[in-house]
Amino acid sequence: MDLLKRKIETEGRVLSNQVLKVDTFLNHQIDPELMVEIGKEFAQRFKDDKITKVLTIESSGIAPGLMAALELHVPVVFARKRKSLTMVNDLLTASVHSFTKNETNEISVSQKFIEPTDNVLIIDDFLANGQAALGLAEIVEKSGANTAGIGIVIEKSFQDGGQLLRNKGFKVESLAQIASLENGKATFLDEAEV
Ligand code: G4P
Ligand code: NA
Ligand code: NA
């Protein structure tokens, strides 16, 4: 997705060979017009997959997840990282280990929001090691529903997550794939010199 890649080039800050900061449009401040375009792109890529629900995870998955759901005309549900006061019964949960933060969190979704008949599109902002997406897919499986695909805004293709998810047979669509963050610069997979 060209618009997104140009945004990463102009506003992204490479913090290390592993980490890209995009807080001006995705992770802190959010660019609504870019989010609309991101939603349209996800809807286009999953238009034949009979999606009935979008599942994402708080907090940074919510904006792109909402816009994808708007374009697909389905509801969006977000997994919580902390249990809410009112969310006590019939929870579907999964443990998600973050290699980046070296911590494991239990994520949860109310069972009533994912039906066994649902065909779910999982959306997240970043794909690094794939643990968040796997946790969401585990929740979908526990609900008896089907994971129809996984949509990612920014995939760091030099980390393991993309391959892990594709090897499991998931349809993974990433709107920007970063091959490298070396030399202080984001190099995209389809624009890398060969
Ligand atoms: P994984 O799910 O792919 O295994 O990822 P990991 O545990 O490494 O990611 C932990 C958190 O860091 C996630 O956000 C993820 O989106 C984010 N993250 C991973 N790599 C990058 C990166 O290069 N740049 C940025 N900006 N974020 C990255 P989170 O803690 O769940 O936060 P949020 O959703 O509330 O923003
Ligand atoms: Na994030
Ligand atoms: Na995220």
Image: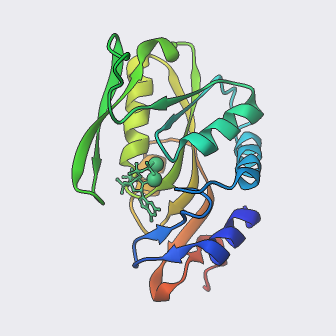
Extreme residue toward the bottom, this view: 183
Quarter of the view holding residue 62 = top right
In percent of the image, x 54 and y 83: which residue is there?
185
Q: How is the image coloured?
A: rainbow
* Above/below status of 68 relative to 31: above
* Above/below status of 111 relative to 25: above
- Picture coordinates of residue 50 (x, y %)? 70, 26
- Picture coordinates of residue 18 (x, y %)? 39, 72
Rendered-image quadrant of the N terminus: bottom right
In percent of the image, x 74 and y 40: which residue is there?
43
Q: Is residue 144 visible?
A: yes
Quarter of the view holding residue 93 = top left
- Picture coordinates of residue 116 (x, y %)? 50, 13
Rendered-image quadrant of the C terminus: bottom right
Q: Is residue 48 visible?
A: no
Side (left or right) of 43 relative to 30 = right
In percent of the image, x 42 and y 18: which residue is there?
110
| Quadrant of the rendered image holding ligand 1 | bottom left
* Above/below status of 188 relative to 47: below
Side (left or right) of 9 relative to 115 = right
* Above/below status of 106 relative to 156: above
* Total numbered circles: 0
In percent of the image, x 49 and y 68: which residue is there?
21
- Picture coordinates of residue 33 (x, y %)? 77, 52
In this view, the residue in front, 121 or 109, is 109
